[in-house]
Amino acid sequence: MRSIRNLIRRFRRDEDGSMTPAFLIMVPLFVILVGLVVDGAGKIQANDNTTAIASGASRAAANAVAAGVITDGGVNLDLNRARTTALDYIAAAGMTGTVTVNANEITVSVQTVYDTHFLSIIGVETLPASATATAQLITQ
């Protein structure tokens, strides 16, 4: 019994390892903070990419229809051609999306996911990114 008391007193007086609890708390918090910065920046970049792809796909669809009008010489708009061109543009970027053609507007919505690097440690594997862009056809 006496040896246990002496052992406890020695541990209370001994300052070796006093930084261990602080270290054990600070390192995981620092890793999570770095993860939020790195993966947050990755999500912002993924959002920028989806915006660029959505805008590009809507412009490509409008150009495809306009090219058809110029080569065919008429005002007959081939809306399936616009939809196919936009979907091909999105697929070439490795993303998924939808294309809606209403009268003289082509609306493209693009979705993708960003695979996290650090946040997967705490169970966040992916972050979604999406964007929508609209192009208007001018037929006059």
Image: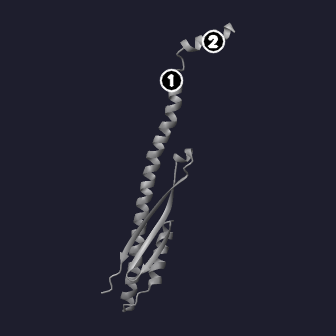
Can you give x and y, in whole percent of width and height, for residue 3 in the image? 67, 8
Q: Nearer the viewer, mark 1 or mark 2?
A: 2
Residue furthest out toward the right: 1
Separation of residues labelled 1 and 2 (CA atoms): 20 Å
Secondary structure, mark 1, is: loop
Residue at (42% x, 56% y) in the render: 45
Residue located beneath label 1 in the image: 19
Can you give x and y, in whole percent of width and height, for residue 123 in the image? 57, 47
> For the N terminus, which image quadrant?
top right
> For the C terminus, which image quadrant?
bottom left
Q: Nearer the viewer, residue 7 or 61?
A: 7
Residue at (47% x, 83% y) in the render: 80
As displayed, is residue 23 above or below residue 33?
above
Q: Are marks 1 and 2 in contact (CB under 8 Å)?
A: no
Q: Dot 1, crowdedness within 10 Å: few (<14), some or many (≥20)?
A: few
Can you give x and y, in whole percent of width and height, for residue 47 in the image? 43, 59
Residue at (48% x, 44% y) in the render: 35
As displayed, is residue 73 above or below residue 88?
below
Q: Nearer the viewer, residue 1 or 53?
A: 1
Can you give x and y, in whole percent of width and height, for residue 16 in the image? 54, 17
Locate residue 71: give its quadrant.
bottom left
Secondary structure, mark 2, is: helix
Q: Dot 2, crowdedness within 10 Å: few (<14), some or many (≥20)?
A: few
Residue located beneath label 2 in the image: 7
> Would residue 17 be found to the left or right of residue 134 on screen?
right
